[in-house]
Image: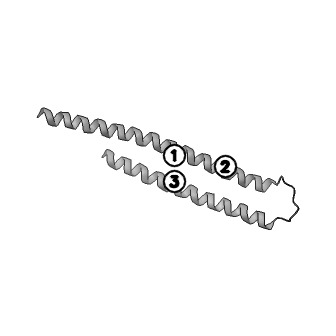
Amino acid sequence: MTVEQIQSLRDRHDEQFHRLLRVECYVDTELLQMEQRQPRYVPYHFPEKDKLKQRLFDIEKERRNLSLRLEEKTQSLEDRLLSLINKHQQLDISN
């Protein structure tokens, strides 16, 4: 059961990573298209462009947080699994 929980957790996080990647690709595409549409001499500070860049930074931040949560949850489930294996071995030796 714990192994299934670990696999389920990984699957769920993989799905979230893929969603983040899709959003990141969408935002990056929008940013590239915006840069292509801009006139050659545009002020450096362009609010829409800045918003898209900020969104990319936010996506990266979300990805790091997701990775951290995955690592923490996986570690706790692996610790639990190891504990259960040890208990099972002790019971098996006792019999």
Name the kind of residue labelled 3 in the image. Answer: Gln
Q: In the image as oriented, which residue stretches furthest toward the left?
A: 95
Q: Is residue 92 left or right of residue 82?
A: left
* Residue ID at (37%, 41%): 77
Q: Is residue 61 left or right of residue 54?
A: left
Location of residue 6 in the rendering, given as x and y in whole percent from the top left corner:
37, 47
Compared to 49, does 67 lie above or below? above
Residue that numbered label 1 is attached to: 67
Q: Under tag 3, what secondary structure?
A: helix
Residue that numbered label 3 is attached to: 16
Within-10-Å neighbours for mark 2: few <14, some 14–19, many 20+: few
Compared to 88, does 9 lie above or below? below
Q: Under tag 1, what secondary structure?
A: helix
Task: Tell which tag, 1 or 3, sits nearer the viewer.
Answer: 1
Name the kind of residue labelled 2 in the image. Answer: Phe
Compared to 83, does 25 lie above or below? below
How many numbered discs sit on the rendered protein? Answer: 3
Name the kind of residue labelled 1 in the image. Answer: Ser
* Residue ID at (57%, 55%): 20
Q: Is residue 65 left or right of residue 53?
A: left
Within-10-Å neighbours for mark 1: few <14, some 14–19, many 20+: some
- Where residue 89 sits, quadrant-wise, is top left
Residue that numbered label 2 is attached to: 57
